[in-house]
Image: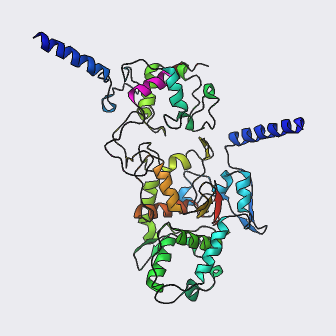
Amino acid sequence: MRVSIITTIAAAVSATALGAAEIAPTAVSFEDGTVSQSLSGVAGDPASGSEIVGSKKLGNCIACHQVSDLADVPFQGEIGPSLDGAGERWTEAELRGIVANAKIMFEDTMMPSFYKTEGFIRPGNAYTGEAADDTFGPLLTAQQIEDVVAYLSTLKE
Amino acid sequence: MTNLKGALSALIVAGSMASGAMADPVDDTLIINEELTIVTRTAAPAHVADVLDEVMSGWLFRGTETRAMQADDFDNPGMIFVEQAEDVWNTADGSEGKSCADCHGASSDMSDVRPTFPKWNDAAEKVFTLEMQINDCRENRMGAEKWKYTGGDIVNMTALLASVSRGKPVNVAIDGPAQSTWEDGKELYYTRTGQLELSCANCHEDSYGKMIRADHLSQGQINGFPTYRLKNTKLNSAHARFKGCVRDTRAETYSPGSPEFVALELYVASRGNGLSVEGPSVRN
């Protein structure tokens, strides 16, 4: 009996370490386009979020949005609204919903859905032009979304 | 010296700021070799007038140096490939021992061809792109091997045929037997493909004139194809560019020459009806 309790605890602990609290892209609960629950269960890191927003290889948010706080990142795009003051205009739950899947709040938005794995037309394997294979995952991980939300929350005018 | 350096770096900073801020198409006129005026901006054809007031060549969205390269055939690297194709035009190939010129005469007599392609082909009962027509000639008139759809031989030949049509308005037919293909192309134009869920229209209808990262979005007109790109230093066909765009939506692309891209080419070409043929153009 004691052995089995210990085994159960050990299993629970290791499951947590592997991210058991993470919400899968297909299981995110939206309410009017907002997501109140953390996707990873771990607080977001604004420094990491800043890197993701500015990096071409990660979120590449500045391909379309300008961010004065990232003035050292060149070639900021003009497609979407400036993200300056985003942390004042939007609550954390709104930001999480917009970053995870903006089309739920704004039906016709051009913005890609960063935490979505289903419902695409001809999904590809990254930028290869080939069909998606079984490695297909969301554009950003649950923790990366949390990091971006944490960073955006710091943007005050 | 120090002053000169200071002035130079000030100029460079001003220059890069200006290009960074540049968003709208420029107000400029393309005159090739100081004699041939190209229509790079005109009223939208009726079938796109609900979404665009004017149609504009991609030339208006490029920088000063790139625009200048296209205005002089000696500076346009695409013209080297036109010269190569002119040699091929006059050289016999295949089992029939015929050259293009044997049936068609001088390449300069072909100026009415490029503006109307893609167009319906009665015998094949489908819409032909210029590449398909060239390969049909090679196989069925010359007894020669087909060329690879986006290979150097065929893109050079399309550059030759475009070059002799420069200044003539694009005028593809969208009605009659071509209509259903045109409608397929239109549907594809508005389909949001790939993991980024982007349609042609998202960038080239809704956002032209804006910067997406370092790229200045144009209307995606194809009147300038094939286009010599400074980025890959070769001529690029419309289907190769379509493939690159669809790939950049993180999608499984269609193949050059596929029915999907033939339909898309007809539709996109029709959005530029009234613009001058300007291939081979020069772009980034």
Q: Is residue A130 magenta?
A: yes
Image spot of residue A36 (x, y percent)? 38, 20
The image quarter in which residue A117 lies? top left
Q: Residue at x 45, y 76 (%)?
A: B146
Image spot of residue B94 (x, y percent)? 48, 85
B12 shown above or below B112: above
Q: From the viewer's perspective, is B26 left or right of B182?
A: right
Image spot of residue A86 (x, y percent)? 54, 23
The magenta-colored residue range is: A127-151
Q: Is residue A27 magenta?
A: no
Q: Main secondary structure of the magenta part?
A: loop
Question: Farthest left residue?
Answer: A1
Q: Residue at x 60, y 67 (%)?
A: B170
A64 shown above or below B240: above
Q: Considering depth in this image, is B138 or A13 the residue closer to the camera?
A: A13
Q: Considering depth in this image, is A5 or B247 the residue closer to the camera?
A: A5
Assign the N terminus of chain B to one quadrant of the image.
Answer: top right
Q: Tell me if residue B165 can be seen.
A: no
Q: Residue at x 61, y 54 (%)?
A: B231
Q: From the viewer's perspective, is A130 left or right of B208?
A: left
Q: From the viewer's perspective, is A14 left or right of B12?
A: left
The image quarter in which residue B60 lies? bottom right
